[in-house]
Image (spheres, grey):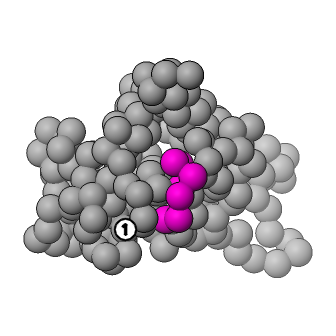
Amino acid sequence: MSERTDREELAAGVDRALGELVAAAKLPPGSLVVIGASTSEVAGERIGSAGSLGVAAALWEGVRRAQARAGFRPVFQCCEHLNRALVAEREWLAGRPDWEPVSVIPVPHAGGSLAAYAFGQAADPVVIEAVRADAGIDIGSTLIGMHLKPVAVPVRPSVKRIGEAAVTMAYSRPKLIGGPRAVYDPAAARELGTCE
């Protein structure tokens, strides 16, 4: 198998997994999706040991394809050396005072290959300290949970691995509050005459 074919398989796997995540979460356009990936793990190596911009380009392409169809906003998680900060488009900061920009440019050995690649591909990149994303995909156990809104709902993808890396996905839902009398389903509320 050629390197080009391998990269196409990686991109297709990411695209498919994200499509399943968008469908499971019923994500509307504009939803924030955190993308965490270890290119080392994708290549079958220990996280942080064999980063690859080529693998990063393939993963980014898969995200781009899924984004083009679904209209979500991807933010790319950096590695632990940058405290898992995230690469985003600067225009998304508008109206988001909770997004704290930080002064750094991710590079493969301090930020990770995917974050570095995403920074280079962004129209006007910014690195932000933290977000509360609507959903996320974790390729290679990079621990994206700190950037998801509570309550996280796991999604079991048909794509179990991208390259050699395990795939984990989740979306968030609002907290369910109340007790045994609480109603969560709009149809049930209509039957009770409380919603039109």
Q: Amino acid at mark 1?
A: Cys
Identify the residue shown where x is 37% and y is 75%. 80
Quadrant in the picture for residue 103: bottom left
Q: Where does residue 2 sit, x and y in percent of width and height?
A: 49, 22
Viewer-proximal residue among 135 and 166: 166
Q: In the image, is residue 44 part of the stretch drawn in magenta?
A: yes
Identify the residue shown where x is 56% and y is 22%. 1
Viewer-proximal residue among 68 and 195: 68
Q: Where does residue 60 sit, x and y in percent of width and height?
A: 38, 38
Viewer-proximal residue among 34 and 109: 109
Q: Which residues are the magenta region?
A: 41-47
Q: In the image, is residue 45 part of the stretch drawn in magenta?
A: yes
Q: Where does residue 193 sit, x and y in percent of width and height?
A: 78, 50
Viewer-proximal residue among 128 and 96: 128
Identify the residue shown where x is 70% and y is 69%. 176
Q: What residue is pinned by disc 1?
A: 79
Side of 61 where 151 appears, left or right:
right
